[in-house]
Amino acid sequence: MNREDFDRLVQRLEAKYAHRPGALRWRVVLWVVAGYVVLFGWLIPLLILGGIALFGGAGLLPAPAAWLIVGAVLFALGLVQTALLLSIRVPAPKGVVVTRTSAPGLFQELDRLSESIRCRHFHRVQLTPDFNAAVYRVPKLGLFGWSRPSLLIGWPLLTSLSPAEARGVLAHEFAHLSREHGRFGHWLYGLNEMWGRVIGQLQTAEQSATIRKFLGVLIWGLNWFWPRLHARMFLLSRAAEYEADEQAGETVGSEHLAQALWRIDCLDFVLRDEFWPEMQRLAARQAEPPDNMLRRMDETLRQAPSDEEAKRWMTEVCQALTDQANTHPSFSDRVGAMGFSADDFRRAGFPGAARGTAAAAFFSTDERQFEAEVSNFWKRELLADWRRRHGRSSTLNRRLSDLPSAPVDAVETSLDVGVLWERARMVADVEGVPAAEPVLRQLLAVQPTHVYASLMLGQHLLDRDPGEGIRLLRRVITSDRDDVIPHASNMLMEHFRRTGAQAELEVIRKHMAAFEVEAAAARKERGMVTAADTFEPHDLSRDELAPLREVLRQQAELGNAWLAQKGLEHFPHRRLFVLCVEARRAGWWGGSGEKDQALASRLVPLVRLPGQVLVIAAGGALAKIAKKVRQVPDSSIHEQG
């Protein structure tokens, strides 16, 4: 199911169950039951049949040895696949664990909220360096469930919000586990998170390579089943967000929760546009992350932005749309449901960080100690990536010094476009995109269709000069460079969502949905080569063929080689070459298919062409394909001497 199909399904379900939330919940239950039937419906019979054959058939039926083998195979297969499902692990969240003993003030607040909201206690409470708070469930039995919730509290959140605002945010998280929501609703809400994380793990490359050997059909079924279940759970999850806001408002006051949401959404822009770019530049200059990163973040959040920035950020917060990319509604929709207007917050001005903070109130004299612990944790987590980035920046700086300087007016020079792009890319990596903007503009003046420069500059300009940024990114998504089209489309969709441009957002969504259909067809088309395919001349120049011919000349056992490309309907610019090789023959009667195959296997890591390459043997299982490749005009690129 592609993005557009999912959005349409959500919209259709939303209209169908708009005034029937109970019917939606029961429909979700039916889908969940169906999912578990699929999981257990083939495992349990497999185990039962294996057990019958193993313990019953071996003693009661003829040929007991055969029944014993059949039973053992079926039973073992059932056990292995059950074990694989149970072995799927979702990583536990990381952070500084706090307890009643180490943080009594915080737990007094949590206990009061738990009692007011009638919520069970969290299994674990952790402080993180994130500007967020969340409930996290880690299923211990994969898709079979059994999870215990943890509460994650971002330290920067506590140092930016007032005590009342922080209580509102925490009350919202507690409300997701509240008895007022009902165990049924809580179960469905948690199930949506759990299935999403587990299926995400199933689809990762690391696990799929092993698991797909045993669970290929099951994974195919889940890939069909999950989007349809998720669309229904998505609506329940969004409704749960509104319910949690309502209950948190009743507990601590809606005005405090609304003010917290306003402060968080506005300060998110400060982190995105000010703090993180500065950390990127710092990593280029400094070999290790600083000890006081949380203090640096707090200082950045407390600096008053310029009037222009404040106006732009507040406008985006108020205009942002609710869409199907996130279960959380937009700020304007959330505060609107509480009875407030987003424009009232905008008129009040940019909030900045609170003066009397929740961190000081909840941790009292231990505030600095916990800040140091979270900072040290963050530094340890960042250290490896920071060092890699610093090493890369040092290498790029040395390479930059070897490049010719970019001229003042690149249009009037013959400076190579490749040199300009390399300089722009390295400057952006080391100093940030703003420092690379002059070189990017020079490059685009020479070659306006350069998609990578258009992508980089377009993303940079989206906030400062939206018109030009949108124009550059539209140029990218209408190009034939399918490797960057999704990135440019996602940036445009996020920009239009943030700025409330619903019509433009729908246009890009439709374009992206069509692209995803085309990309899926292209993957399928390239996933298999058969004798029924059409093969065409390789169309490579003498210079493009030279490196390949040199590799072939170095193969003492090579007799002949032919090169063609598969005729492609989808993304034909991404070529798929087929190189057919034949080992040297000792006489006119031919040679061995095994030698051909061994030669083809050795050549696979050595062959480099401007596209995907399949190396096949002239003899053996792919002989029919090889025959068609040899029949393509001008396909012979190496002959036995």
Image (cartoon, rainbow, N blue to C red):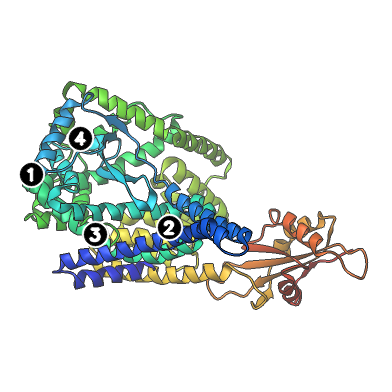
User: Which label number is shown at residue 158?
Assistant: 4
Direction front: furthest residue? 60
| Residue 455 tag number | 2
In this rendering, is residue 195 above or below 521?
A: above
Q: Which mark is residue 251?
A: 1
Q: Which mark is residue 315?
A: none
Measured Cα–Cα span from mark 3 to mark 2: 20 Å
Q: Could you tell me residue 625's position as x and y percent?
A: 71, 73
Q: Residue at x 72, y 76 (%)?
A: 628
Spatial CA span between label 3 and label 4? 28 Å
Give amino acid for label 4. Leu
Which quarter of the rendered picture does the N terminus lie within?
bottom left
Dot 1: what SS? Answer: helix
Toward the viewer: 399 or 511? 511
Give the labeled residue for mark 3.
499
- Amino acid on which the number 2 mark rests in the picture: Leu
Residue positioned most to the top: 365
Q: Are marks 1 and 4 in contact (CB under 8 Å)?
A: no
| Quadrant where the C terminus is found in the figure | bottom right
Disc 2 or disc 1, which is closer to the eye? 1
Whichever of labels 1 and 4 marks the residue nearer the N terminus, that label is 4
Quick one: label 1 or label 3, which is nearer the N terminus? 1
Q: Position of residue 326 (x, y in %)?
A: 27, 57
The percent coordinates of residue 303 (x first, y second) are 22, 36
Q: Is residue 403 visible?
A: yes
Question: Residue 590, percent across and down?
Answer: 88, 68
Looking at the image, tell me whether mark 3 or mark 2 is earlier in sequence order: 2
